[in-house]
Image (cartoon, rainbow, N blue to C red):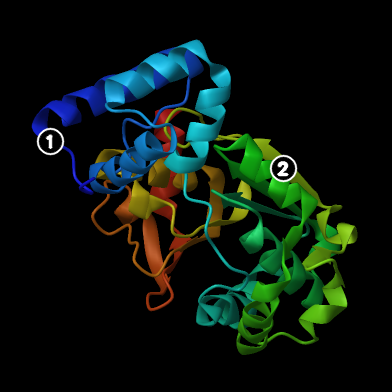
Amino acid sequence: MNDTLAPHEEIEAELLLEAIFRQYHYDFRGYSRGSLHRRLIRAMQRFDCESLSQLQHMLLRDPAVFGELMGFLTIQVSEMFRDPAYFRALREKVIPHLRTFPSLKVWIAGCANGEEFYSLAILFREEGLEDRTIFYCTDISPAALQKAEAGIFDLDRIQLYTENHRLSGGHSSLSDYYTAAYGAAVFDKSLRRRAVFAQHNLASDHVFTEAQLVSSRNVLIYFDRELQDRSLGLFGESLVRGGFLGLGSRETLRFSHHGDGFDDFDAEQKIYRRNALALERTANAA
């Protein structure tokens, strides 16, 4: 099967996404079509469907099918301390500013299976900020949130995570934070004591907290421009003045209508800082 959709299949794909939204209230209509179409093709193969219309028929009648389909529609591949230079920049440049706040809220938007949360929780512990921080870990996928809260990762990935942690400027050994057993690394549950795991859809939900740091990395690349813009608006509304936004290495906010509400803080590592203009825009919208 080719990894592209024929014109009539593109129509079927649009109808399927609309059916998902109406039946299950998950909105994938603003996701980048190229990536989404490839995932739908793989889902057709998994469910042995000859067409997307047949797949739509199945998922509308069986919620279990939709639950499994979510695994194809959402991307949950990440790694701890991914792009170590980003975490080093947080440690060396952003943390000194965050120290000035008496309490901190960090929103990890699109936390997937939890790798970024545990990276930030470890970093904040090493920098002495854990006890004054609440981490809000959100994702569209309930299954991903369950994995994130469990904090169990394949042991064969730990060597990569350990090297990433070292390159990020870690003050200790990553092995201090997990127990190895039966081919898995189980991270210390104390890392989760300041964390809230909650379902949140950037396509349809609204801001729920005021934060000093929003880290949403390698999420926007799966959205179309309109949904990217909406998401960046949510991040801007959530951040306090002088708060920080971290994006993925292939992401930017400079195309966005909300771009002028942020200043470059570390352009190379895609870290931005909310400015007064964003604050005024939020106040006027209210």
Are the residues flagged by discs 2 and 1 in contact, CB closer than 8 Å? Answer: no
Q: Which of the 4 image quadrants contains residue 5? A: top left
The one nearer the camera, 75 or 205, is: 75
Q: Where is residue 23 in the image (x, y as percent from the top left)?
A: 46, 13
Image side of residue 48 versus residue 120, left or right = left
Residue 62 located left or right of residue 121: left
What separation in Å lies between label 2 and label 1 (alpha carbons)? 36 Å
Rendered image quadrant of residue 171: bottom right
Q: Is mark 1 on a helix, strand or loop?
A: loop
Q: In the shown orientation, is residue 81 left or right of residue 286? A: right
Residue at the spot 43% in from the left edge and 38% down from the top edge = 46
Q: Residue 6 carries which label?
A: 1
Residue 266: percent from left, percent from top: 43, 76
Q: Quadrant of the N terminus?
A: top left
Q: Which of marks 2 and 1 is in front?
A: 1
Q: Can residue 21 be seen in this view?
A: no
Coordinates of residue 260 in the picture (x, y in percent): 31, 55
Say above or below: 268 vs 71: below
**Residue 132 has which mark?**
none
Please name the amino acid that badge 1 sits on: Ala
In the rendered structure, find residue 146 and report the number of the disc placed on it.
Answer: 2
Q: Residue at x 38, y 79 (%)?
A: 268
Camera-nearest residue between 63 and 271: 63
Q: Which residue is drawn at 54% across and 63% down?
A: 78
Please say whether residue 64 is visible from this viewpoint: yes
Q: Which residue is drawn at 27% across and 46% down?
A: 257
The one of 14 and 125 positioned closer to us in this rendering: 14
Q: Is residue 37 above or below residue 148?
A: above
Name the amino acid, label 2.
Answer: Gln
Please provide percent x and percent y for residue 86: 52, 76
Q: In this view, does 29 lie above or below 74?
A: above
